[in-house]
Image (cartoon, rainbow, N blue to C red):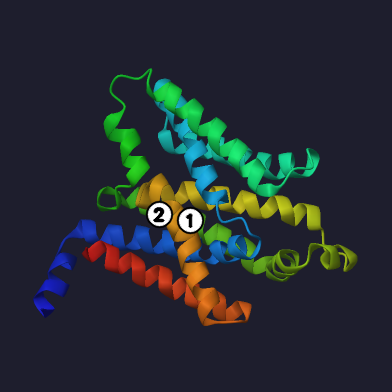
């Protein structure tokens, strides 16, 4: 039994996989708490699926799929909030618009490429066992940057998540915060794609945070349980 638990860690690719998946789980679990509190559960899914268009464009022109996804995901994240505010429609409706349009563009472009299977489908479902040290470093740097921003603006993000009207009355830049969170979701989503893929990034954003809300009432406790749940799930997934 003990040998079965220890044996996988004799391989270097498992060390890289553990670090990449842990970085992704950590940042997704923290960002996911604010996503769940704001009722934006499908934001990550919309950004992840719509970024397929950016991946396809980059692949079509021979560029980096990661940076293609990144270049598409950030405007898509901001567009969701912009459409919701300017067009006076519900946030979930704006999420659906970006989800459908980006994913449709991605599918159309994928159908024009004859040999897309290996790279694009690796990002659809993730390839955590195939990450390089460079990709581990990139995921870690992005995760660290996002967590530093959250730490610096923790109070503002917290107040805005619970009561935007009271936050505005208190002098908090609510509009900026309402654009910042989707932007953080977009960055987190793209950084996690290599490890968990488009299909599973929603689970990593929402499930740990949603589970944590059942186990704690105050935000620090919710965040701690969310991170713990995400990391445990990640390690268990590597064994499976």
Residue at (63% x, 65% y) in the render: 37
Query: Count of labels shown?
Result: 2
In the displayed structure, would residue 112 be above or below residue 103?
above
Closer to the camera in the image, 73 or 137: 73
The residue drawn where x is 30% and y is 68% is 235
Closer to us: 168 or 88: 88
Quarter of the C terminus within the rendering: bottom left
Q: 98 or 113, which is in the foreground?
A: 98
> Which element carries disc 1, helix, strand or loop?
helix
Q: Residue 140, position in %: x, y?
A: 44, 58
For the residue labelled by badge 2, is the local secondary structure a helix, a strand or a loop? helix
Disc 2 crowd, CA 10 A, few/some/many (<14, 14-19, 20+): some
92 relative to 54, above or below: below
Q: Are marks 1 and 2 in contact (CB under 8 Å)?
A: yes
The answer to whether residue 13 is left or right of residue 112 is left
- Residue drawn at point x = 41 percent, y = 34 percent: 65
Image check: 14 left or right of 56? left
In the drawing, what numbered circle is on residue 141? 1
Marks 1/2: CA–CA distance: 6 Å
Residue 88 visible: yes
Whether 128 is drawn above or below 121: the answer is below
The quarter of the picture where the N terminus appears is bottom left
Can you give x and y, in whole percent of width and height, for residue 164 in the image? 79, 62
Residue 137, which numbered label?
A: 2
For the point 48% across and 77% down, which residue is it?
Answer: 225
x, y percent for residue 203: 43, 58
Residue 31 badge: none
Drawn side of residue 79 relative to residue 104, left or right = right
């Amino acid at each position: 039994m003990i040998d079965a638990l220890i044996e996988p860690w004799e391989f270097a690719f498992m060390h890289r996989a553990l670090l990449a998946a842990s970085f992704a789980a950590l940042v997704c679990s923290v960002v996911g708490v604010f996503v769940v509190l704001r009722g934006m559960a499908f934001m990550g899914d919309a950004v992840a699926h719509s970024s397929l268009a950016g991946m396809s464009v980059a692949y079509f022109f021979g560029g980096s799929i990661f940076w293609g996804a990144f270049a598409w995901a950030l405007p898509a994240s901001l567009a969701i909030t912009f459409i919701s505010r300017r067009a006076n429609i519900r946030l979930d409706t704006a999420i659906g618009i970006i989800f459908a349009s980006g994913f449709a563009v991605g599918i159309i472009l994928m159908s024009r490429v004859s040999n897309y299977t290996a790279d694009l489908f690796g990002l659809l479902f993730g390839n955590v066992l195939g990450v390089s040290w460079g990709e581990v470093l990139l995921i870690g740097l992005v995760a660290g940057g996002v967590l530093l921003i959250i730490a610096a603006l923790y109070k503002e993000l917290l107040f805005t998540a619970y009561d935007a009207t009271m936050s505005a009355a208190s002098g908090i830049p609510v509009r900026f915060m309402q654009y910042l969170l989707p932007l953080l979701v977009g960055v987190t989503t793209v950084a996690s794609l290599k490890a968990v893929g488009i299909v599973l990034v929603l689970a990593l954003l929402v499930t740990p945070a949603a589970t944590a809300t059942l186990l704690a009432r105050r935000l620090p406790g919710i965040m701690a349980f969310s991170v713990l749940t995400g990391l445990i799930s990640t390690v268990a997934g590597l064994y499976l």
